[in-house]
Amino acid sequence: MLTTQSFIVAVCAYGLAALFGVAMIRRLWLQRSMSLGSSIGMGLIGGLLLTPAYPSSEASTIAPALIVVIFNTLFGEGFAAALEPALWLTVGGVIGALLGWWRARRRISAESL
């Protein structure tokens, strides 16, 4: 059983790994200046990796929504058990894509000044 302290450490470690992964994707795949589409894509990836969800209705701890959806669908009770985390994952992806779009628009307007 996880203690509160080990759970917080695990969630922080996952968050840092996800941020590091997004930074490495940006550095290795998109080396030149990012276009609007690639900014939206990076925001989407970040949103999908960082969105939390409860694994079940009885759970008191969170987990990454992407992992919850995959595990509940494949090893749990099917897609019915993964529906709510899938909705959270979708919302996280949309918010991430919107943040990527907003950042790209802000960068484009700053470069035109």
Image (cartoon, rainbow, N blue to C red):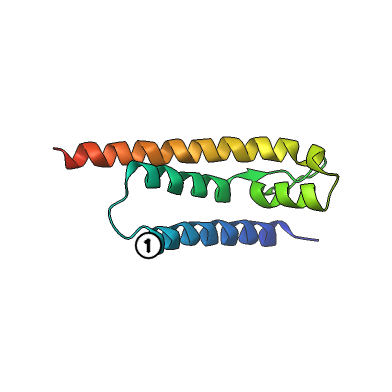
Q: Is residue 70 left or right of residue 58?
A: left
Q: SS of the residue at dot 1?
A: helix
Residue 23 seen: yes
* 22 vs 57, nearest the viewer: 22
* 25 vs 88, nearest the viewer: 25
Figure quadrant of the N terminus: bottom right
Residue at the image position 32 percent from the left and 41 percent from the top? 104
Image position, residue 103 (x, y; %): 34, 40
Image position, residue 113 (x, y; %): 13, 37
Residue at the image position 50 percent from the left and 49 percent from the top? 46
* 85 vs 29, nearest the viewer: 29
Residue 57 seen: no
State how many labels appear: 1
In which image quadrant can residue 110 be found?
A: top left
Q: Is residue 41 left or right of residue 79?
A: left
Image position, residue 84 (x, y; %): 72, 35
Residue at the image position 69 percent from the left and 47 percent from the top? 62
Residue at the image position 58 percent from the left and 35 percent from the top? 91
* 59 vs 42, nearest the viewer: 42
Image position, residue 86 (x, y; %): 68, 39
In which image quadrant can residue 58 be found?
A: top right
Q: Is residue 85 left or right of residue 104?
A: right
The residue tagged 1 is 27
Disc 1 marks which amino acid? Answer: Arg
Crowd tier of the residue under label 1, counting other residues whose Cα lies within 10 Å: few below 14, some 14–19, many 20 or above: few
